[in-house]
Every structure is written in C-alpha cells, then in structure tokens.
Amino acid sequence: MKKYLAALAVTIGMLDPARAADYPVRPVTIVVPFSAGASLGSIARIVGDKLAARLGQPFIIEFKAGASSTIGTRFVAQSKPDGYTLLVSATGPMSVVPVIYKNLPYDPMEMTPVAQFMRVPFVIATEPGFQGKTVKDLLELVKQNPGKYNFASSGNGTLVHLAAQMLLDQVGAKATHSPYSSGSQVALALMRGDALFSVANISTVSAYFADGRLKPLATTGAERFPLLPGLPTVSEGGLSSFKVSHYVGLFGPKGMPDAIADKLNAEISAILREPDVVKAFSTQGDLPLAADRAAFGETVRSDAKRWGDMARTMDLKQQ
C-alpha cells in the first residue's frame, strides 16, 4: 500500500501544472538514434540550442546509433517519462523499422508525440546524362527496359527505398535497387551514372542541381516545394495519386505528462518561426513546419499505416 501511494504521489507530482511551469529544472537529453553525421543531428542541434536559450537549461544532443535507429529509440522509450529524455526521429524509423525488426521491446506508436519540426517531400533526381525531362519520361524508359536500370537509396528499407518502389509500382515498371550507406553516396552514384535515379531527400542532393551534376525532375509533395519552386510535383506530371512526404519531430516516452509536452510544443512552434531557424533549415534543403500535438500525432499514425503497409507488401526483412 505504501508503494502504491508513493507511486501515486509521484504521478500526481508529474502532472502538477506548477511543475510543468518550472520545467526544466535540470539538463534535458535529446537522443538522436543515428551517427553524428546524420541530418537529424543538425536539426536537433538547431532546435536544442534554441530551447536551451529560451528555457534556461542545457538541451544536450546525444547520439545513440545502431540497429537502424532501434538502440536510441529503445533507450528513450524505456526512460523515465518525465520530459528529461527525448527523441528526435522521423517517418522511416517510426513507421518502417518496426516492420523490419520483429519483436522490438518497444512500440513507437505508444511513445508521446511532442512536436513536429518539419514535413517535406522528396525529390526525384537522375544522373546528369538522362535525356528525358519529366518523371513520365523516366518511368517510360524504365518500363520499356525491365531490370536494366538501377535506382539508388540510402539503404534497404529506408523511406527513400520504399518511395522509389512505390513510384515504380504506379506504372508497373521494374528496376534494380542499389542501396548505399548514406545520402552522399547516393549522390555520388548518380553523378557517376551507377544508378539512373533516386527518390532522394532534398537535403542530400539539392546542392548538385545548379551546376548540373544531378538532374532534378520533380518533387513528391501535394504542392510545389518553396525551395525548389521551378520543379513540378509528380502529380502535376500526371501521376495524381503519388503524393509522399516525411516528417521529423520530437518524441517522449509513453506516459510523458501532457503539460510538459504541451509546453515543449509551444516553445518549438515559436522557435520554428524565427527567421534564423528558417534560414538554417533552408540552407540544408529543409523547411520548418510546426504542428500542434494532435495534428502531429495524426501524422505519425497515418504515416505508420501507409509506410508500414508498404514495407509488409515488399516483405522487407532485417539485413
């Protein structure tokens, strides 16, 4: 009985709005479940530094890479849900990895969605010698030559792998998947002509568009991407049902107090509107986009359904 009352007191204390108002009273750890060179790391640092300045406590970025993000995610999922251990993650780790890695000791859908940092499309880029001008040209070439061409991704089971396969499936085209270990290697593979195309993260390839080292065809969102306004969307090119994007956001463990999550969401929403933050995001090919917690939670759930179903259809397995 004493243990029960003690636990109840702790829970009530965690939910106390006064405590949320004081939060944080000590350093907060933000875990990035990838290596230090990952783009999520730079995004986490931008937001973490701003949170530290606004809330008066350090927000320490800690990289816990390994097993396709599951090591870092597990660490946060099993941490005390007090708002002092948080996770920066994205659509792929939250939606696809749980399908590929069976029997994970955590359920990402039970984690607390705190704040969305951005939601951006991909870009379809080709090797510079590709003679076509549109996504339809690309798909027609691939369809007429089943299995002849390669498409590049930053790894088996990554979201860009699934997005490319989804694109090919739109017209029944067949190409060979060539996975690489990073987005920069994807760009190099395209430049060398080792792969015909990639459905790539804009941040990893857009720097090579202006000088012609890579050829962009279209972005994959519902609307044109403001940083690449001259590029049509895939749907503008005739594939009206192909609209895909991905998010990056902040999560806490299951049971994180709403008052603390709400406070972080409000602070981050304000941070993402600051001009220097918009500039820092856009410099690497991203745009910040805030969302309230309900909207972000719905995005997390709908992406998990869509991309999880795709991973199951492709029968992806751990490698």
Image (cartoon, rainbow, N blue to C red):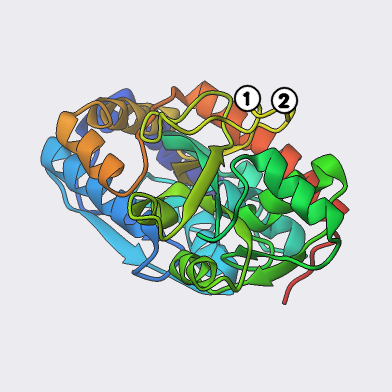
Instruction: Kindly state the secondary structure of the residue where label 2 is placed.
Output: loop
Residue 166 place in picture, x, y as percent: 76, 46
Q: Nearer the viewer, mark 1 or mark 2?
A: 1
- Nearest the viewer among 233 and 36 is 233
**Amino acid at circle 2:** Ser
Query: Is 118 or 279 nearer to us in this picture?
Result: 279
Residue appearing at x 81%, y 40% in the figure: 170
Image-quadrant location for residue 221: top right
Which secondary structure, mark 1? loop
Q: How many marks?
A: 2
Instruction: Residue 62 in the image: state x and y as whole percent.
Output: 33, 65
When the figure is inspected, residue 230 is found, relative to residue 42, above or below; the finding is above
Q: Quadrant of the C terminus?
A: bottom right
Image quadrant in which you'd find residue 300: top right
Front-most of residues 185 and 245: 185
Look at the image and tell me whether residue 8 can be seen: no
Residue under the image location 50 percent in, 59 percent down: 128
Q: Which residue is mark 2?
A: 240
Residue 181 lies, in percent from the top left, at 53, 74
Q: CA distance from mark 1 to mark 2?
A: 7 Å
- In this image, 289 relative to 282: left or right? right
Residue type at tag 1: Glu
| CB atoms of marks 1 and 2 within 8 Å | no
Seen in the image, is 49 located left or right of residue 255?
A: left
Image: 220 above or below 148: above
Label 2 Cα neighbours within 10 Å, binned few <14 / some 14-19 / many ≥20: few
Assign the N terminus to one quadrant of the image: top right
Outermost residue on the bottom side: it is: 319
Judged left or right of residue 284, residue 178 is right
Horizontal side, residue 288 vs residue 192: left or right: left
Residue 151 visible in the shown view: yes
Per the image, the residue denoted by label 1 is 236
